Image (cartoon, rainbow, N blue to C red):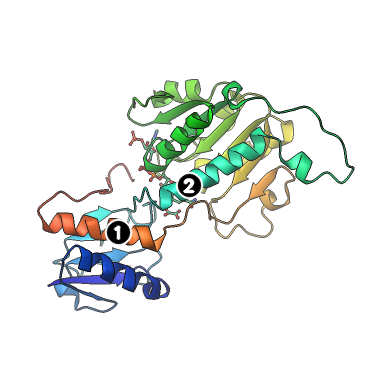
């Protein structure tokens, strides 16, 4: 019998409980899944960074902490988590949501939808948009989510470049890595999609110098994390027209304070950190599969590299 502590928020428990139970049954694992278990008896913790449980030091026999979030920046610094820490990777739910959100926002700008949707003067805008193959899109971060988005955008026909820490080889995507690679990836890009984790190395990766190499009138789409952008530099680039419009889903402070200039800016679309939710149905499948695999002696999947911060 495995003891699985659910510490991903009591509000999430009613939805997760039957789904996790069903998945454990399918894996033929006998478990005690509960909100309360004596710490020394706990085998695995299903966790969320916003959990009331912050001191994990009493869980001395815990084999792994499995976060339901993809981003790990809020937990990598928790010194009481000494157990292996796994993050959420879910190609059937989270990644699909991100692909839909990113593709939707890229297509909005590519097709110039706004001027037809909001057209109070009833202007007959008859210039048709170019084809996707005439547009360069750069995706910063080619991990689980960045790669899924880059592949979809390439399938639609965009010229897609990507940037990551380690150089990748992905069919249909021009891949770059490292500092020089970043400037090459961004030069003349008409769209930039940020899907990097928030780490000390990625803070302000989008700054004045890098915004300046984009194509004039580029679009910036950030579903990654707020600290990836130097906000003052982005606001200046929006004022000068170097950036035509930005869609921002994540911010340094969330919810975004009412007096933040992003709210009032006519060329900024704010969405409230909804780009890609963890979907309990598919997330339960990946959580339980990881635990079941580990119990069979397989290596844990999606383990956070604490030294890299993601
Ligand atoms: P991954 O860890 O799979 O991918 C991260 C990518 O970023 C990798 O390609 C990695 O490079 C690259 N990277 C990391 N550090 C650097 C660096 N210093 N320089 C260049 N590239 C770097 O993460 P996911 O794709 O699963 O998620 C990405 C982020 O999306 C999450 O961290 C989270 O912040 C955000 N997110 C936002 C959501 C929302 O609703 N808004 C929902 C879910 C996630 P390499 O491949 O070489 O390691
Ligand atoms: C996540 C997020 O990291 O929703 O999962 O941002």
Q: Are marks 2 and 1 in contact (CB under 8 Å)?
A: no
Question: Which residue lies under the disc numbered 1?
Answer: 285
Is residue 224 or residue 127 the one in the foreground? 127
Q: Is residue 234 above or below residue 126?
A: below
Residue 159 relative to residue 178: left or right: right
Q: Position of residue 128 (x, y in %)?
A: 74, 28
Q: Secondary structure at mark 2?
A: helix
Residue 170 relative to residue 256: left or right: left
Choose the circle earlier in sequence order: 2 or 1. Answer: 2
What is the quadrant of residue 104 in the picture?
top right
At x 25% / y 49%, what residue is drawn? 303
Q: Residue furthest right?
A: 121
Circle 1 packing at 10 Å, graded few (<14), some (14-19), many (20+), is some
Q: Report if residue 304 is visible in the image.
A: yes
- Give the position of the N terminus as an image quadrant: bottom left
Q: Secondary structure at mark 1?
A: helix
Residue 39 relative to residue 114: left or right: left
Which image quarter has ligand 1?
A: top left
Q: Is residue 276 above or below residue 184?
A: below
Question: Which residue lies under the disc numbered 2?
Answer: 98
Q: Position of residue 180 (x, y in %)?
A: 43, 21
């Amino acid at each position: 019998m495995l003891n699985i502590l659910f510490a991903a928020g009591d509000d999430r428990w009613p939805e997760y409980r039957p789904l996790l139970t069903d998945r454990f049954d399918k894996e033929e694992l006998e478990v005690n899944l509960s909100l309360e278990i004596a710490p020394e008896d706990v085998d695995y913790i299903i966790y969320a960074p916003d959990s009331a449980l912050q001191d994990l030091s009493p869980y001395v026999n815990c084999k792994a902490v499995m976060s339901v979030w993809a981003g790990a920046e809020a937990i990598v610094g928790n010194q009481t988590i000494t157990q292996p820490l796994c993050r959420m990777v879910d190609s059937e739910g989270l990644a699909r949501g991100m692909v839909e959100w990113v593709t939707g926002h890229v297509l909005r700008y590519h097709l110039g939808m706004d001027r037809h949707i909001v057209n109070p003067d009833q202007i007959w805008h008859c210039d048709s948009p170019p084809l996707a193959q005439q547009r360069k899109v750069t995706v910063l971060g080619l991990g689980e989510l960045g790669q899924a988005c880059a592949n979809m955008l390439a399938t639609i026909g965009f010229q897609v470049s990507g940037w990551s820490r380690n150089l990748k080889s992905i069919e249909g995507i021009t891949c770059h890595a490292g500092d020089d690679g970043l400037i090459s990836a961004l030069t003349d890009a008409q769209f930039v999609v940020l899907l990097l984790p928030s780490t000390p190395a990625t803070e302000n990766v989008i700054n004045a110098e890098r915004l300046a190499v984009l194509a004039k009138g580029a679009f910036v789409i950030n579903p990654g994390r707020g600290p990836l952008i130097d906000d003052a530099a982005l606001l200046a680039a929006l004022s000068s027209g170097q950036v035509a419009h930005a869609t921002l889903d994540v911010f340094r402070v969330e919810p975004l304070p009412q007096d933040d200039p992003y709210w009032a800016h006519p060329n900024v679309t704010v969405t409230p950190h909804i780009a890609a939710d963890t979907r309990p149905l598919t997330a339960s499948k990946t959580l339980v599969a990881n635990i079941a695999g580990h119990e069979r002696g397989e290596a844990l999947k999606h383990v956070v590299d604490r030294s890299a911060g993601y």
